[in-house]
Amino acid sequence: YFSMALRFEVLGRFNRARAAQLTLPHYVCHTPLFMPVGTQGTIKGMTNSQLEEIGCQIILGNTYHLALRPTSELIDELGGLHKFMNWPRALLTDSGGFQMVSLLHLADITENGVTFQSPVDGKPMLLTPEESIEIQNRIGADIIMALDDVVRTTITGPRIEEAMYRTLRWIDRCIAAHKRPHEQNLFGIVQGGLDPVLRDICVRGLVDRNLPGYAIGGLAGGEDKDSFWRVVAQCTAALPEDKPRYVMGVGYPLDIVVCSALGADMYDCVYPTRTARFGTALVPEGVLKLKHQAMADDTLPIDPTCTCMVCKNYSRAYIHCLVTKDAMGSQLLSYHNLYYMMKLSRDLHSSIIQGRFPEFVCGFLQKMFPKGDVPKWVCNAMEVAGIDISSCCAPFLTSQD
Amino acid sequence: MKFAVQKAWSNSGRARVGVLEFGSNHKIETPSLLLSTRKGLPLFISPDLLSSLPFPDSHLLQVSPFHFLEGISAKTISDVGGLHDVVGLNSNDYGLVAVPRDSLVSLPDCDGSNKFGASFETPGGRRLIKPSDYMNLINSMKPNLWVTLADEVPAWVSQKRNKISVDRTITWLDQCLSAQNPSNVVVLGPIVGGSDVEERRRCAVEVSRRNVFGYWIGGFGLGESRNERSDLLSAITDHLPEEKLRQICGLELPEEVLQGVAAGVDLFDSTYIYHLTLGGFGLSFPLERRTRAIEKDVAIEPIEKAGSDQTKINLRHIIHRKDMSPIVEDCACYTCRNHTKAYINHLLNVHEMLAQILLEIHNTHHYLAFFRKIREAIKAGEFEEFHAMFVKNRREHLAVSSVCA
Ligand SMILES: [Zn+2]
Ligand SMILES: [Zn+2]
């Protein structure tokens, strides 16, 4: 029987949506939750105390980057990533495979693993499932990810099928290589592109392995939104009720709300911090571009309804004069954007627990689409999720369905 | 705002301890450090982290109005409620001191200045600032304390240029004072005049005739030699009334600050911290007041060859790669309580901004502690010994490291 280092208790439901308590070795998390990306052992421009203050529960570290610098051996020797970065709460590391395929043009995937050119000396290197797990065992995160065969979602044909079956073969190699199952939770990743048959085979294969948690991979890569939510809906329906479900690379607030309605629990994305560095704030209405000249004389806070340190203290005009020029601009905007994501996570959790999830979703959609022009794909997904959003959709749009 | 010099202590020469009162009864003891800022906030320390620094020592900030020549208008600053509200620092808790020059990105350009105004290098390029432009900024910012526009020149300009500098500075002082918002009467008058003691005296006499709260000593840190500085500084302060506040720009290193303190200067800026932080250095000099002479065998540590010296640590160096100790073992700052040299070394290696956040916090904390030691030494009547010992240790250290090199 596969051992686990987590407990997942569903505290409340609304149709497919669920609010849960996820007990990890380093922290008791509440889902749905968003994980900020701390690529190199830090969230850009934020201190740990600030991350704790805004309610960040779990941070994602990138295995590929950490393995390059400071190296997993050094992290291990110094007591693991928690100790190295002095982060007391939960951590998750990815497998490193996706980063290689997306960052290094010369990556090539074979049955043995991912072959790539070393960015240090240009020599060919190989990342096998065994090595990925070994590195992640050394880093020591609460959740580690299986190495999967990543293909672009926009690709079609036999390559998708090959990648799916290879992902299933690799999961057994990952399980066999995992040395710390009592301290670290290995999540399997569902692949299969946009093909429901392949996704189904992959989900069933992974569920047979009885893993501590499951991720839905291969999404958020440029596929159309209708395909995106349908894959999520299909996978969440087939994955076990008592295990966490993580949709990888998803971070737009709207996508998180939709996926949560469909029964997903965890998300990660660089979007909130990256967009902050380019001067964009996340607000209930969507986004606010602080670089815009109109912000120069705007004495309102970024979001008048936000209670974060930045919105309590600063005008849009001051942030406008900082963004993209001074470090403080991206620090303050990252703080606000992550606060926004943490508040969204908390609101999803509490509205599900309190049985007012549809009201929350409607309120969210009304602010984002005040004219009632909620995108068709959102309406379709909410119908499958059993959330009535007719009150926030313009009548002519719904009557045309 | 109030300022009072405490009683004089024997054996402290011109060095003095004073109390500057601002906001809701906050009393900051001088000699003290003004935190250098970019657009009103420390470069990397956001206000929530700023509050973790020693109180009230860290609550005086120096602001250059010229950082606001672009991006935000004087009217908007005023609409928001003044600079305190713009930068999110409560006016009851934080004192903002506006000085045209920041010694970093806003520097006087004496060749470009003319009778209409002072030329400055600013973040938005070279600009000629007239007293009226300057007052427009000051009146909208409403700082706690501000320096009038000066025609600042380096020590090596001609006698003629030096004299013009004093004349213009006095004219602009009058123009600024007459244009000031009546609620903003806490002004520091600039003392210029280069290395000409007679011009400095003339400037001091003229400024003292006006309604000023204290003095701002200009013309330093612009390429003058450190050796001639001590005598010049003392000659200048000797012409200033004892009871009023004295601020200076352009003295950076601990030794330079000690020179200023020895001459009776009360307020300094923290451009040193800025340079250390961007360079990846952490301040580490010992803070015991009775600094002992360095034991020679201790001085020749391998660390010497790592671009570090006895006052600072080069955290970029590979020898810190596995060092799980804080920058300074018993330092109580946020950085040292939470993070190791190994982690900061990694952050610097991968160009992560958190490195600068952590270094600016530690360096500010350490430099504030240095100022506290200076005050303690003055109060104990031991400033001259403290000064001499500090300089001697540094010199011995430099001699030791040059032998090693
Ligand atoms: Zn906010
Ligand atoms: Zn420290």
Image (tube, coloured by chain):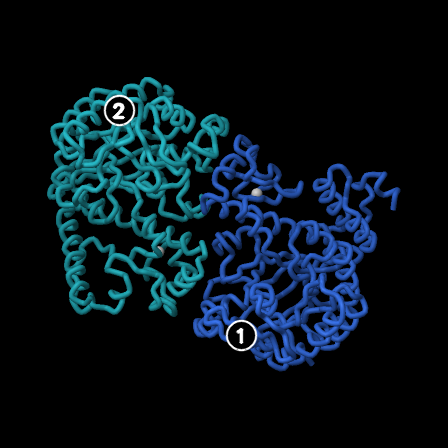
* Point 49% across, 53% down: residue: A46
Q: What colour has chain B?
A: cyan
- Say what amino acid the circle numbered 1 marks: Ile
Q: Give the left or right position of residue A59, taking residue B128 as reference.
A: right
- Say what amino acid the circle numbered 2 marks: Val
Q: Which residue is mark 2?
A: B212
Q: Is residue B150 above or below residue A347?
A: above
Tag 2: Cα neighbours inside 10 Å, few (<14), some, or many (≥20)?
A: many
Would you say residue B251 is visible in this rendering? yes
Q: In this orientation, which residue lies closer to the viewer: A211 or A288?
A: A288
* Point 23% across, 49% down: residue: B254
Q: Give the left or right position of residue B309, taking residue B230 as reference.
A: right
Chain appearing in blue on the rendered image:
A
Q: Quadrant of residue B5?
A: top left
Inter-mark Cα distance, 1 to 2:
66 Å
Q: Which residue is mark 1?
A: A135
